[in-house]
Image (tube, rainbow, N blue to C red):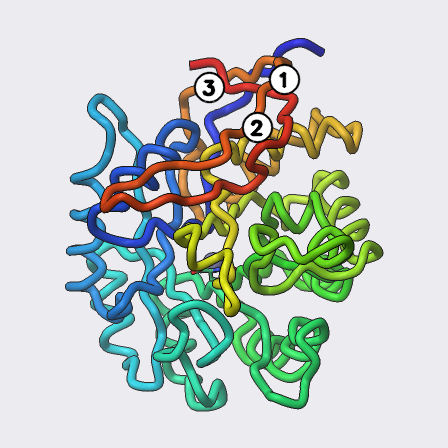
Amino acid sequence: MKEITITKPDDWHAHFRDHEILAETVSASARQFGRSIAMPNLTPPVVNAELAKAYEKRILEHRPKGSDFTPLVTLYLTNATTPAQIKEARDHGVLAAKLYPAGATTNSSNGVNDISKMESVFTAMDECGMLLLIHGEVTDGDIDIFDREKVFIEKYLQGIIHKHPTLKVVLEHITTKDAADFVIGCSDNVAATLTPQHLMLNRNDLLVGGIKPHYYCLPILKRNTHQEALRKAVASGSSKFFLGTDSAPHMKDQKESACGCAGCYSAPAAIELYTDIFEELGALDKLEGFASHHGADFYGLPRNKEKITLVKESWTMPSEVHVPGNNVIVPFWADQKIGWRLKS
Ligand code: DOR
Ligand code: ZN
């Protein structure tokens, strides 16, 4: 196959960050996606309707001319979130709220300390049709970093889903066979997003032959058997799995550091990387469902009307992306070959 045309895809998990870097992150996503879920882990976090609408406005101010790219802003759940705040945000068009266990990842210190105290918030979300997006990792110091997703599912997720069977839940950026199997075994109200890095890499790629800070993200890459299970899950064509890049830019010096930040900036080549993956899997016929149909259907939104075309043409991801403030980001897959190119 030399060319593939699919419905314009959406990204159901992206970090645009804020202010001047939006010029870079918003155009990188708008190049390929119709819509992106904009994660709320800003400083300070997006905790109510007013902050969400203001963030949406700042993103839209950086939308390239002529583009109809639509950011879907989300709410950041804290210990202090109230059912009234949920309903108000839903009334203002906010479709989803993100649950970060406090301390699980970048800018999650304002996240939730005690998930059992969130019952009335989850009920309000269910009642008003707001989706619950979950960073599914426990933060207990005695739980090994490679086990944190599996333990979260057992300790919290099963209970949330049991108590709120009609609440729509997305387990974000899944990294384990345990998570893929769990989602497959749940009702149609539970789905998962998958990133390019967790489909392309495993922990050997991160750690063997020298540590690769640009492959460090959270949840951390797992062993190859988990990677294989994730690849099998997307190749199956199941509508429970859809595209969420978790594109998460950090400046080069903060990644290449003695205490490096978690996150891979994959937006510059996201749809091309996913196309490479589905081609390798012999499942190019499943790309459109994963990238363009399943997420919209799960969120209850119309599928995009436009199409995009990818051409089989090898190119190399640049080493660096220059951003305002004299800063540099190393994009995911820097200096490496990509087999498909988006036709402009
Ligand atoms: O690697 C990650 N980076 N994982 C997350 O959950 C957050 C993200 C970020 O915001 O940098
Ligand atoms: Zn994320």
Front residue (pair 22, 300):
22
Question: What type is the residue that disc 2 sits on?
Answer: Glu
Question: What type is the residue that disc 1 sits on?
Answer: Ser
Secondary structure under the numbered disc 1 in the rendered image? strand
Q: Earlier in the sequence, mark 3 or mark 1?
A: 3
270 with respect to 300 (left or right): right
The residue under label 2 is 272
Query: How crowded is the residue under tag 3: few (<14 C-alpha within 10 Å), some, or many (20+)?
Result: few
Secondary structure under the numbered disc 2 in the rendered image? helix
71 with respect to 311 (left or right): left
The number of numbered badges drawn on the structure is 3
Q: Nearer the viewer, mark 1 or mark 2?
A: 1
The yes-or-no answer for disc 2 within 8 Å of ligand 2 is no
Distance in Å between CA atoms under marks 1 and 2: 10 Å
Secondary structure under the numbered disc 3 in the rendered image? strand
The residue under label 3 is 307
Relative to 89, does residue 208 appear above or below in the rendering? above
Disc number placed over residue 314 in the picture, else none: 1
